[in-house]
């Protein structure tokens, strides 16, 4: 039953709701909630294990983004906003610990209750939770936030709304959310929705608000000043309400954070070398080893810090748009993967220092295992046997070349597969039976020098197959618009994945939104096997079943030949001014948006 149908019945008399709550029983208020088992931290924990509760406050840092922005509202589909804002200026009822697979602790909420089967979840607000203008966070704000984000917000927020049966006030500071399907993760996802101020948007168009309408948040930082497309300056709120709650102790320590915007990565790196930026993340191991030798590093004014992690590789590479022919044919996609000479390209760009991603969850216990599927993984896969591509059950691995520039053996295999799919050389070009030439349009963002180099090498191999290659490089706004409109054949792709994948998997590769404008399912996966295995993951009641379902999903996605994987970011690399300090304890997820600068501090 849809939430829209139930909306007239949501304003239930409080007394009736409380009676219902008592009748459902078997739930106790808790300081945290884990996907499986109990939270690792006790109710009286002092701070997150990877935060320094005694970290000093103060200092100013400057970070750099490439591209620009035309919005300061990170919660809507329209426009491009600085990606950092939703992490620094806004908060949710619960906050995530990055030292556990998926566990939340109280943030705006002081406690959480849930049914044994997690068919509902109830949050109790902290009495002193405040927006940045000093007004109290209310249950009305909470309920409105779920509804507005679920109906008018960014696509990343809309999936939950369709799974909410009802959302009701159960007390002066408590709210209960009832779900309409069995899914253990929904209680946690609900805890992570950002809370906005209802009064700010009365009489305004939330989804199409102009740049100057910056959503009020409860977070530690406020937008202090900005110039569209050039910079955003944030200051720590001196009256921030949550400075002393355990989840926040030792975090958000910097007084001022400025984000400068640059046309491309090369200009940004030069700005860092010149001392205009405080820190940069580096994703190229060869560049890290060979280009971070400038005078500031030699003097010790800039420090190189490496941060290991235990999270899955995720998927980084070049995604193929399977909505278009001939890319809907797996043989064509396999041919394109065979022609991609990873070993030679990797040696050229990274010096061969970074290992290749071998599957979506590689590097973790969730990754598909080598060889044929066995046990519970095989059982799950055979339910969808008719929909599986070759290699899914019996075993699939990415093509490997001999490392030479010509890659002859794989080019021959690619040519054979293309012929099987109806594409043969005619008058020097690869054509189908109607004589139409095979043309491949590659979309790249300006400033992506590594992507440009990889595609230049790749295009030479494709031309040997008779494929015509068109490379388009566009600015960040055009790139966002083109990918949102699904206007590409191949483009760069990155999906970070966690140790506890869940409902976001539907957004990434679920069939429901495969053809929607702005979808995150860029490859256009529309597979009953993928949908069914995501369902199996979400319905798992034990960690063992969950791991088996994820390994099965990993097999289907990898054997689907949807993305040409490149190298793995196997360790975080941050170059930073010597004044930036970090805690000694590292979270299992390593570096990420909620690690640096959130738990770092500045020592002059």
Image (cartoon, helix red, strand yellow):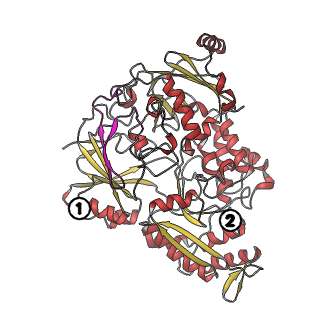
The disc at residue 481 is: none
Per the image, the residue denoted by label 2 is 324
Report whether residue 451 is seen.
yes
Q: Number of labelled discs?
A: 2
Per the image, the residue denoted by label 1 is 274
Instruction: Give the crowd class for mark 2: few <14, some 14-19, many >=20 residues within 10 Å.
Output: few
User: Element at badge 1?
Assistant: loop
> Which residue is located at x 52 percent, y 43 percent?
207
Please indicate whether residue 300 sits to the left or right of residue 368 in the image.
left
Taking the view exactly as shown, the residue that stands out farthest to the front is: 203
Find residue 295 and report its horizontal and vertical position in percent: 21, 63
Please indicate whether residue 357 sits to the left or right of residue 419 in the image.
left
- Counting residues from the start of the chain, the first of labels 1 and 2 encountered is 1
Please indicate whether residue 172 sits to the left or right of residue 21 in the image.
left
The answer to whether residue 273 is above or below residue 162 is below
Q: Is residue 178 magenta?
A: no
> Which residue is located at x 71 percent, y 81 percent?
431
User: Element at badge 2?
Assistant: loop
The answer to whether residue 489 is above or below residue 96 is below
> Which residue is located at x 58 percent, y 32 percent?
36
Magenta extent: 215-244
Q: Quadrant of the N terminus?
A: top right
Q: Is residue 241 magenta?
A: yes
How far separated are the C-alphas under marks 1 and 2? Answer: 46 Å
């Amino acid at each position: 039953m849809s939430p829209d149908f139930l909306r007239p019945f949501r304003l239930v008399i409080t007394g009736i709701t409380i009676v219902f709550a008592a009748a459902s029983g078997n739930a106790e208020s808790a300081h945290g909630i884990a996907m499986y088992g109990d939270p690792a931290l006790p109710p009286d924990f002092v701070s997150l294990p990877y935060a320094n509760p005694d970290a000093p406050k103060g200092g100013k840092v400057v970070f750099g983004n490439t591209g620009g922005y035309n919005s300061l509202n990170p919660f809507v589909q329209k426009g491009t906003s600085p990606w950092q804002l939703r992490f620094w200026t806004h908060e949710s009822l619960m906050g995530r610990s990055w030292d556990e697979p998926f566990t939340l602790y109280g943030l705006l909420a002081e406690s959480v209750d849930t049914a044994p089967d997690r068919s509902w979840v109830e949050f109790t607000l902290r009495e002193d939770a405040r927006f940045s203008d000093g007004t109290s966070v209310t249950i009305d704000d909470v309920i409105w936030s779920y509804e507005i984000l679920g109906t008018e917000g960014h696509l990343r927020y809309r999936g939950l709304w369709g799974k909410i049966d009802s959302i009701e006030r159960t007390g002066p500071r408590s709210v209960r959310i009832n779900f309409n399907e069995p899914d253990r993760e929904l209680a946690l996802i609900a805890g992570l929705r950002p809370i906005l101020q209802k009064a700010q948007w009365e009489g305004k168009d939330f989804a199409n608000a102009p740049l100057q309408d910056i959503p009020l948040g409860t977070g530690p930082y406020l937008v202090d000043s900005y110039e569209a497309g050039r910079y955003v300056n944030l200051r720590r709120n001196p009256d921030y309400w949550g400075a002393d709650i355990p989840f926040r102790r030792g975090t958000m320590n910097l007084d001022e954070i400025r984000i400068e915007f640059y046309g491309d990565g090369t200009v940004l790196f030069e700005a860092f070398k010149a001392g205009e930026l405080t820190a940069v993340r580096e994703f190229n191991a060869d560049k890290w080893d060979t280009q971070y030798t400038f005078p500031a590093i030699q003097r010790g004014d800039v420090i190189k810090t490496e941060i290991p992690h235990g999270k899955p590789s995720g998927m980084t590479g070049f995604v193929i748009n399977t909505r278009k022919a001939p890319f809907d044919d797996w043989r064509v996609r396999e041919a394109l993967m065979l022609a991609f000479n990873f070993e030679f390209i990797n040696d050229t760009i990274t010096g061969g220092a970074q290992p290749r991603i071998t599957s979506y969850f590689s590097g973790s216990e969730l990754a598909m295992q080598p060889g044929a599927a066995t046990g519970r993984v095989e059982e799950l896969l055979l339910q969808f046997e008719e929909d599986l591509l070759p290699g899914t059950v019996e075993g699939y691995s990415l093509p490997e070349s001999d490392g030479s520039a010509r890659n002859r053996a794989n080019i021959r295999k690619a040519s054979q597969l293309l012929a099987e799919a109806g594409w043969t050389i005619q008058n020097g070009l690869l054509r189908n039976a109607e004589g139409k030439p095979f043309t491949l349009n590659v979309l790249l963002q300006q400033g992506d020098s590594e992507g440009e180099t990889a595609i230049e090498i790749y295009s030479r191999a494709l031309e040997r197959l008779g494929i015509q290659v068109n490379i388009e490089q566009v600015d960040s706004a055009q790139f966002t618009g083109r990918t949102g409109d699904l206007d590409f054949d191949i483009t760069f792709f990155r999906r970070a994945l966690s140790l506890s994948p869940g409902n976001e998997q539907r957004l990434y590769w679920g069939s429901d939104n495969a053809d929607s404008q702005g979808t995150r399912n860029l490859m256009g996966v529309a597979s009953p096997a993928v949908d069914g295995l995501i369902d199996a993951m979400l319905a798992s009641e034990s960690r063992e079943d969950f791991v088996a379902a994820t390994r099965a999903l990993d097999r289907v996605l990898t054997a689907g030949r949807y993305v040409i994987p490149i190298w793995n970011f196997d360790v975080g690399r941050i170059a930073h001014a010597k004044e930036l300090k970090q805690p000694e304890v590292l979270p299992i997820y390593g570096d990420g948006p909620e690690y640096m600068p959130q738990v770092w501090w500045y020592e002059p």
